[in-house]
Image (spheres, helix red, strand yellow):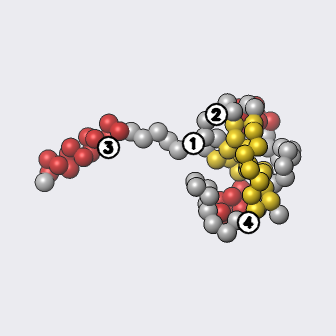
């Protein structure tokens, strides 16, 4: 079995995994509205042998079982100022 992966053309780095290509029946309409236009990125095995770049297989399987889709959101932005201040504080302690 395979699942289809769509990227949002409205929200960067936002991907929607669904169990069947073009079958958005299990996805809430409010989520589809937020994502806006979608583009099919790839079709992958539903039970892949290894994790994707930012998706764990167990999380994908659990989401399909519980809600019928998986939503991959972008990572939070890096706080370079916080990292810099922490490095400075560490340097002062040494």
Is 22 placed above or below 48 here? Answer: above
> Which is nearer the N-term, disc 2 or disc 3?
2
| Crowd band around label 4 with a 10 angstrom C-alpha radius: few (<14), some (14–19), many (20+) | some
Badge 1 crowding class, 10 Å Cα cut-off, few under 14, some 14 to 19, many 20 or more, is few
Asked which quadrant contains residue 86, the reply is top left
Q: Crowding near pointer 2: few (<14 within 10 Å), some, many (20+)?
A: some
| Front residue of 21 and 63 | 21
Depicted 3 relative to depicted 28: above or below: below
Q: Position of residue 76 (x, y in %)?
A: 50, 41
Location of mark 2 (residue): 11
Residue located 69% across and 33% down the image: 9
* Disc 1 target residue: 74
Q: Nearer the viewer, mark 4 or mark 3?
A: 4
CB under 8 Å between discs 2 and 1: yes
Pointer 4: what residue? 47
Q: Which residue is mark 3?
A: 83
> Is any part of residue 69 visible from this angle?
no
Looking at the image, tell me whether mark 1 or mark 3 is earlier in sequence order. 1
Sort mark 3 into few (<14), some (14-19) or many (20+) by Cα contacts within 10 Å: few
Q: Is residue 23 left or right of residue 56?
A: right
> Could you say which is closer to the camera, residue 86 or residue 9?
9
Residue 59 percent across, percent down from the top left: 65, 59
């Amino acid at each position: 079995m395979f699942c289809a992966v769509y990227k949002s053309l409205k929200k960067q780095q936002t991907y929607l995994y669904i169990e069947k290509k073009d079958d958005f029946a299990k996805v809430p309409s409010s989520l589809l509205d937020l994502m806006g236009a979608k583009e099919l990125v790839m079709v992958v095995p539903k039970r892949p042998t290894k994790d994707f770049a930012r998706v764990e297989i167990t999380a994908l399987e659990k989401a399909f079982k519980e809600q019928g889709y998986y939503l991959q959101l972008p990572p939070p932005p890096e706080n370079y100022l916080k990292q810099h201040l922490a490095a400075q504080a560490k340097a002062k302690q040494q």
